[in-house]
Amino acid sequence: ATGIYTVVVSFVVDKDGNISDVVALNDPGFGTAEEAVRVIKKSKQWTPALQNGTNVKYRQKQSITFMVSEG
């Protein structure tokens, strides 16, 4: 089970930079998907997207890579 595993997490960033609707889009196992969601949920505010000079709500995808080693 030693290896490098990447989890893609999708979530919504609102106009104020708050995040919600955090979901893992894949699950390589070893608890990585749950940990990736936990890390994103605990993150500080994100920078909102700008559209025509105005902050807008958007869906973000973020990859998180884990190096797993047994033993």
Image (cartoon, rainbow, N blue to C red):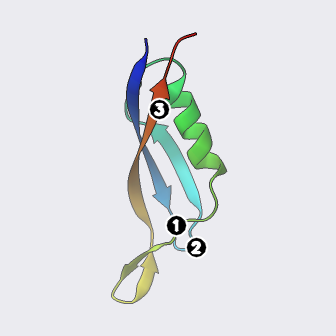
Q: Residue at x 53, y 37 (%)?
A: 36
Q: Position of residue 50 (x, y in %)?
A: 39, 80
Q: Is residue 24 above or below residue 50?
A: above
Q: Residue at x 51, y 71 (%)?
A: 47
Q: Which residue is mark 1?
A: 14
Q: Which residue is mark 3?
A: 66
Marker disc for residue 24: none
- Observer-nearest residue: 35 or 24? 35
Disc number lying in front (2 or 3): 3
Report the amino acid beneath label 2.
Answer: Asp
Report the amino acid beneath label 3.
Answer: Phe
- Observer-nearest residue: 47 or 59? 47
Q: Are marks 2 and 1 in contact (CB under 8 Å)?
A: yes
Q: In the rendered structure, which disc, 2 or 3, sits on the residue that comes first in sequence? A: 2
Q: Which residue is mark 2?
A: 16
Q: Is residue 52 above or below residue 67?
A: below
Q: Residue at x 39, y 89 (%)?
A: 53
Q: Position of residue 16 (x, y in %)?
A: 58, 73
Inter-mark Cα distance, 2 to 3: 29 Å
Report the amino acid beneath label 1.
Answer: Asp
Task: Give the quarter of the image for residue 29.
Answer: top left
* Tag 2 secondary structure: loop
Residue 56 in view here: yes
Which image quarter holds the N terminus? top left
Task: Specify few, some or many for label 1: CA neighbours under 10 Å numbering under 14, 14-19, or 20 or more.
Answer: some
